[in-house]
Image: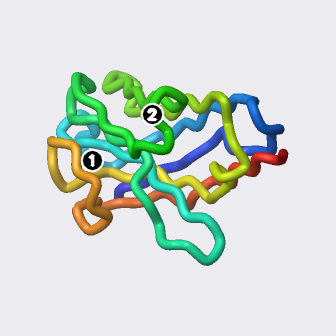
Amino acid sequence: QVQLVESGGGSVQAGGSLTLSCAASGRTFSNYAMGWFRQAPGKEREFVAGINWFGGLTNYVDSVKGRFTISRDNAKNTVSLQMSSLKPEDTAVYYCASSSLGRITTTTGEYAYWGQGTQVTVSS
């Protein structure tokens, strides 16, 4: 049974930083790309960042480029999202997801497994 468990969410003021972590179990973690998505109230879930199977390639939505960094540790089966210079518009529930593919994909439907989500709230 595949499990993804996120941690590290919370409330911060604009300009602050948070690091989200996701611990994976139940499948060969290193075979698959990983992604972070977010969903704000009343909005669709959107791709935030992705990393390929060995961590050599990353991709970000334009709105977070230069502020967020995704990384993975295949020895520990974890993926992280370092977020800095946070803005109120970053407020959302953030989800960790494990892809069906080894390459990065921004398509929600190509992610086979999802975590429960962790709330990030950025106040102005």
- Secondary structure under tag 2 reads loop
Amino acid tagged 1:
Arg
The residue shown at (47%, 66%) is: 45
Which tag, 2 or 1, sits closer to the chain's start? 1
Q: How many marks?
A: 2
Work out whether 25 lies above or below 112.
above
Query: In the image, is 124 to the left or to the right of 18?
Result: right
Work out whether 111 lies above or below 35.
below
Q: Residues within 10 Å of mark 2 (few under 14, many from 20)?
A: few
Return the x and y of residue 115 as percentages of the image width and height: 49, 57
Quadrant in the picture for residue 108: bottom left
Q: Which color scheme did the rendering employ for the protein?
A: rainbow
Work out whether 118 lies above or below 45.
above
Label placed on residue 65:
2
- Secondary structure under tag 1 reads loop
Quadrant in the picture for residue 92: bottom right
Return the x and y of residue 1 as percentages of the image width and height: 35, 59
The quadrant in which the C terminus is found is: top right
Amino acid tagged 2:
Lys
Query: In the image, is 57 to the left or to the right of 124?
Result: left
Return the x and y of residue 21 as percentages of the image width and height: 55, 36
Read off the residue under disc 1: 27
Q: Residues within 10 Å of mark 1 (few under 14, many from 20)?
A: few
The residue shown at (40%, 54%) is: 47
Return the x and y of residue 82 as percentages of the image width and height: 55, 29
